[in-house]
Image: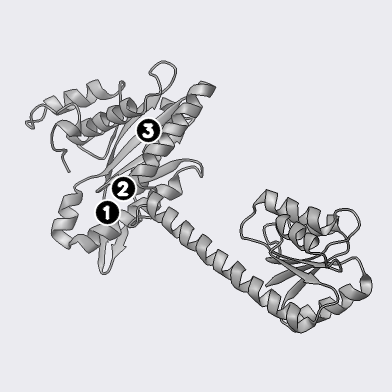
């Protein structure tokens, strides 16, 4: 664990550095308050800081206040070192944000014990952060595929549409559904189906731009949010997704499976508006038409629907509902 030692007296600094190194700590030295503050700015900043109260530039209290105002994570445990012994000084130091206060001259055994206390608190805080992040991950991520979950998709789409509305740029939504996925589960079992979903999700994530969002909407259905993407760009991205999924050999145990997907696209812009639910429904209806038109294809809402509808009418399957919410979707 790193410990910052901010002490302007060279001899005292040398003695304390030797003691800290002997206790197994990595020591970061600072000769004044400005150096101490800079040392605590990086992502790998020391977890414990020993600050002399009286230093050139910023004094120990000023550094302490700046650290607390920054509210950085993980937590920095601060011990003030000073020759002041008035009760008012102790109160002032703790009020500035110090966790502990050690009067000079002090015994090294006492300092070691105080640092051990600080280390326990820092480690506990790290555990709390890890637990919080784990809960956040569970709340925002689909546990099977590691993609964003439905809640995150809806929240992100709403934010992206608002941002695109302010900048007057387009935003595309793509529904992706794996074709005949029920047959995979029925023929090979749900564990194989789960692996197919995982590998298909991984394939899609690799194809998209780093700032695009792909998430699992439910079952074998995924949603892609393409911010700043017009119809032509969305169609090109969807085609890359379709071709990549179709071209991926999915190895599961001794099996090698191939699946295809159907995609429905809807684009929000100044002409169509940026209403989240309307876009989702339009993309969903376009996906339904892609499934009814033969699967393994793309339909763009408002552009490809006539061609898709004529293909459907040539089949004996009957009329397609306007949306999957009005009836079961083909697999």
Position of residue 180 relative to residue 143, above or below, is: above
Left or right relative to 292: residue 275: right
Q: CA distance from mark 2 to mark 1?
A: 7 Å
In terms of sequence position, does the residue under pointer 1 or pointer 3 come before the other? 3
Q: Which residue is painted at 13% across and 38% down in the image?
A: 328
Position of residue 303 relative to residue 100, above or below, is: above
In terms of sequence position, does the residue under pointer 2 or pointer 1 come before the other? 2
Residue annotated with mark 3: 173
Task: Please report contact status of discs 1 and 3: CB closer than 8 Å, yes or no.
Answer: no
Q: CA distance from mark 1 to mark 3?
A: 25 Å
Disc on res. 258: 1
Residue 29 falls in image quadrant: bottom right
**Residue 203 location (% of width, % of height):** 39, 51
**Residue 216 location (% of width, % of height):** 33, 47
Q: Nearer the viewer, residue 63 or 213?
A: 63
Q: Nearer the viewer, residue 34 or 307?
A: 34
**Residue 68 location (% of width, % of height):** 69, 53
In terms of sequence position, does the residue under pointer 2 or pointer 3 come before the other? 3
**Residue 232 location (% of width, % of height):** 43, 27
Position of residue 79 relative to residue 14, above or below, is: above
Q: Is residue 147 visible?
A: no
Q: What kind of element bears circle 2?
A: helix
Disc on res. 246: 2
Left or right relative to 74: residue 197: left
Q: CA distance from mark 2 to mark 3?
A: 20 Å
């Amino acid at each position: 664990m790193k410990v910052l030692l901010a002490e302007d007296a060279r001899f005292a600094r040398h003695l304390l550095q030797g003691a800290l190194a002997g206790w197994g700590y990595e020591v970061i030295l600072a000769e004044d308050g400005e150096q101490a503050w800079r040392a605590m700015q990086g992502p790998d900043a020391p977890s414990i800081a020993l600050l002399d109260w009286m230093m050139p530039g910023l004094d120990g209290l000023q550094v302490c206040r700046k650290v607390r105002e920054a509210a950085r994570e993980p937590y920095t445990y601060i011990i003030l070192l000073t020759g002041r012994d008035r009760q008012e000084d102790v109160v002032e130091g703790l009020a500035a944000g110090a966790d502990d206060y050690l009067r000079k001259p002090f015994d090294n055994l006492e300092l070691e014990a105080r640092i051990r206390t600080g280390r326990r608190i820092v480690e506990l805080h790290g555990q709390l952060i890890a637990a919080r992040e784990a809960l956040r991950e569970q709340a925002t991520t689909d546990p099977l595929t590691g993609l964003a979950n439905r809640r995150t998709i809806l929240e992100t789409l709403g934010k992206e549409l608002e941002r695109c509305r302010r900048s007057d740029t387009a935003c595309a939504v793509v529904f992706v559904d794996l074709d005949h996925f029920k047959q995979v589960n029925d023929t090979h079992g749900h564990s194989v189906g789960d692996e197919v979903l995982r590998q298909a999700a991984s394939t899609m994530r690799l194809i998209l731009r780093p700032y695009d969002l792909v998430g699992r909407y439910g079952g074998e259905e995924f949603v892609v949010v393409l911010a700043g993407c017009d119809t032509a760009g969305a169609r090109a991205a969807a085609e890359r997704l379709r071709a990549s999924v179709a071209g991926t050999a999915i190895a599961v145990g001794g099996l090698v499976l191939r699946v295809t997907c159907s995609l429905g696209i809807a684009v929000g812009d100044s002409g169509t508006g940026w209403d989240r639910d309307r876009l989702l429904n339009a993309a969903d209806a376009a996906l339904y038409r892609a499934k009814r038109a033969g699967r393994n294809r793309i339909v763009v809402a408002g552009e490809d629907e006539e061609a898709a509808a004529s293909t459907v009418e040539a089949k004996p399957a009957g009329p397609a509902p306007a949306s999957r919410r009005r009836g079961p979707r083909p697999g």
